[in-house]
Every structure is written in structure tokens, then in C-alpha cells.
Amino acid sequence: MKRLAILFSAVALAFGAQGASAQETDGPVREKRHEFNLFVGFFGADLTMSAASSSYDRPELSVLYEPHVQNSVTPVITLGYNYKLLGFLKLGGQISYAGYYRTTTYLIDGRVTRGERVDNLYALPEVKFCIPSAEHFRLYAKLAAGARFRLQGGKEPVAFAWDITPIGFEWAGKTVYGNCEFCWGNVVKGARLGIGYRF
Amino acid sequence: MKKYIVILAAALAVFSSCSKRESDGAIGDKSKDNVYARAYMMCIVDNLATDILNLFEDALEVNADYHHRTTQFDFSGWDFCTPGTIWTVKPYPNPLQGLMMECIGENRWSAIYNGDYVFGDSSCFPTNISMTLERGAESGQKGHFNWNITLEGNRTEDNGYSCLFRTDAVVSYGVSDRISSSNGGWDVLTGIYYLDVMKDGKVADYWKFEMNGSSAYSGKFSRGL
């Protein structure tokens, strides 16, 4: 996992560096209104499927006989779009895809049911607040809320979904740039790394 | 630009394969079959029995001590070893408050408990138990005895689960020379515990735990209707 995070970071940095160099050669770039972002999120979260602890932490029959559901960690791919409404405010949305493998374990006999695939699609309108900072380094925060749709497997075909990014970074150019953001919600718990393009 | 897209695609592919491996790694360890049920049996049935045995040895120890009897037990008679005498465990500090201990013959007692029973940090659930005890020889430690017991009881837990537990014949709690400290427990256990698991009032499973003379944790556990 760590290697992958480093690898993806390197890719994002490379994009940012390319954007920076392009900007240096192109000269000042006027403020862009549209931006697209492609993210990979680590530690995808699906709170509705975590039914119980997987450890035998207390002597109770329900712990022995009821299923313990665990989800494998899968990447969450997010495509985002933002439109610059005001100097610091952008409106847009994000569409995310996450595939989960659900493993069910029964402690009483070690029986394991695995491999059920659950595919989720998230559609979340979002508000992005940009904080003025250095030319090649920007800070922002995002609030997003919308719906989660089950494409395959699981229960609850539609459910509420939310995603909060208390802090995110953009670095390098105004046209092509790299992203790193910390987020919490029921789409991704942890961090997202991505690349962005403004026009 | 194209080479970055290739790198990105490769990174995603590797990440996906790693995620799959983590999924495989989450599969339960089948070698742990019944370990949890055995632990439950020990936590609930065996510990309940030994808690009661400890209380009996406490009662016998303070039988001649007026001060201790009045602080730990309510009693209907002075001598705990006289048939018909009933001692009841006071609320503090014992969790088995209200345990009724009655002498029913020479070196023989019965115990009845209806209340919540908690083991360690586990949840507290209503537990009823009826037990007979026969005191055997005193072990190498003063005041620590070998016991033969029979018991039956039930426990009601959350989510519709409950259990009935019992002994068909006598279960012996013996003390070996390995135990050196006073009231150090019982490590020569012989007999069979049975436990029926109930779900919504119907029998869902059946457990059998055979103790063959060594410590309870090394007995033979089996399950299945």
C-alpha cells in the first residue's frame, strides 16, 4: 500500500511539475473557470456494510453465531468537476466509483463466505472553498453530499452519501496540477491523490 | 502526456491487485474452529461454577467467624454445615449477590442463583443456576477442597439468543499438587458439560465439553446437533 501511495504521489507530482514548467514557458496564465480532477482515494469506506467487529471481544452467543462482515480495501476512483463562481468559491460535483469485496465470517465454525462483489457509484454535488496562498501552492476545502447507488450486490440500492475535505492542496501550475486532500465521509476515509486540469 | 497516463494506469492496476490480496488475507483461520465456543464455555459455565465454589470455601473458612459472616453473608443459622442452614451472599462486594447456599446434608449443599452474571468485561445477562455440591477431601492447602458438583442453568442474551447448560453426571473439581497458593483454583477437572444454544426459543446448536482430568482449557469440545 505504501509503495502504491508513493508511486501515485510521484505521478501526481510529475503532472504538477509538467504543469509548472509549461506555465513558466507560457508566461502568466489568466484565471481559469473550469477544472477537472481525477482522484484515487485510499481506504474506501462503506459504513452500511460493517455489521460487527470481527474479533471475539466478549463472550456472547450473538458474537459467535451472527455474521461478521468485513470489506476489503479498494481504491475509490473519483472524477470531479468545478466551476469558479467567485474568487474563492467553486461549485461542482464528483462522481466516484468503488468496488468492494465483502467477506462474511462466522466465528462459531470458521465458515467464510467471500468474494461477493459490491459496486457503488457515488454522485455528489460539491462546494469548494479556495484559500488564497502561494502561486504554485493552493489550499482548499470541500463539502459534498449526494447519493450512493449500488450497481451490484449489497442492500439499499440508494443511500445518502457525504464527503468532507477539511483540507486539500494543489501544487504546481494553473493549468495542470497535482492534488492531495484529506477527506472523511462514507465515500473515502483517509486521503485522495489526484491530478487536475483547468481551462 | 501519454507516458503519464500509462504510469497512472499501471499504478491503478497494481493497486487493484494489492487490494485483492488484502481481501484474500482477510479470510478466517479455520484452525480456530470452536476456540471461541470453548472460550464461551469457560467464561460462562466454568467460571460461574468456580465463582460459586470459591464462595462456598469462603463461607466454610469464616464459618466460625461471627464478624465475617455478618459482613459477607446473611444467614439463617450459625453453622453452615448443619442441614437446613441457609446462607445468602450479601450484595457487596460479590457479583453473585443473592446466591442462596443451603446445607442439605453432611458435606453437601445446594446453591441457587437468579440474577445478572458478568464475566470480566463482558455484558451482563440474566443467568439462573441451580447447583449441588459435595465437599471432598481437603487439598494440600488449608481450606481448599476437592468438590463434586452437578449444575443446570440458563442464560438469556441479546438478539434472541439464550442457552441452557447442565451436567448429566457429577463434575469433579480437583486440586493437584501443582497449585501451591491458597485458593489457587481447581486444575483436575473431570466430567462433561452440555450446553444447548437457543435462538428465538428454539434449539440452534448443541455443545459438549468433556474434561478429562487436566485443566478445563484442555478438554475435548464438540458441537453440532
Image (cartoon, grey):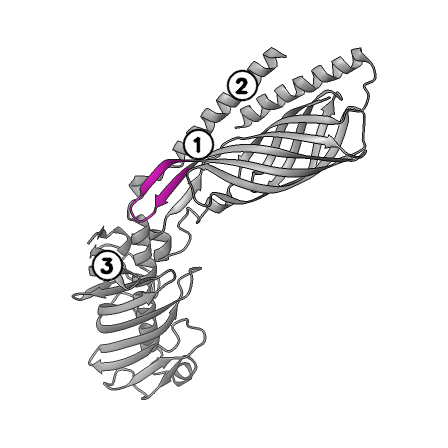
Q: CA distance from mark 3 to mark 2?
A: 64 Å
Chain letter of disc 1? Answer: B
Type of the residue with mark 1: Glu
In this figure, which residue is indicated by the disc labeled 3? B188
Within-10-Å neighbours for mark 1: few <14, some 14–19, many 20+: some
Could you tell me which residue is drawn at 39 percent across and 46 percent down? A68
In this figure, which residue is indicated by the disc labeled 1? B22
Whether residue A185 is visible, yes or no, is: no
Type of the residue with mark 3: Val
In this figure, which residue is indicated by the disc labeled 2? B9
Question: Do the residues marked 1 and 3 share a common chain?
Answer: yes
Q: Disc 1 or disc 2, which is closer to the eye?
A: 2
Type of the residue with mark 2: Ala
Q: Which mark is residue B77?
A: none
Q: Secondary structure at mark 1?
A: helix
Question: Do the residues marked 1 and 2 share a common chain?
Answer: yes
Q: Disc 3 or disc 2, which is closer to the eye?
A: 2
The quarter of the picture where residue A161 lies is top right
The quarter of the picture where residue A26 lies is top right
Question: Where residue A12 sits: x, y (%)?
Answer: 64, 22
Question: Where residue B202 sits: x, y (%)?
Answer: 25, 62
What stretch of residues is rendered in magenta? A102-117
Q: Secondary structure at mark 2?
A: helix
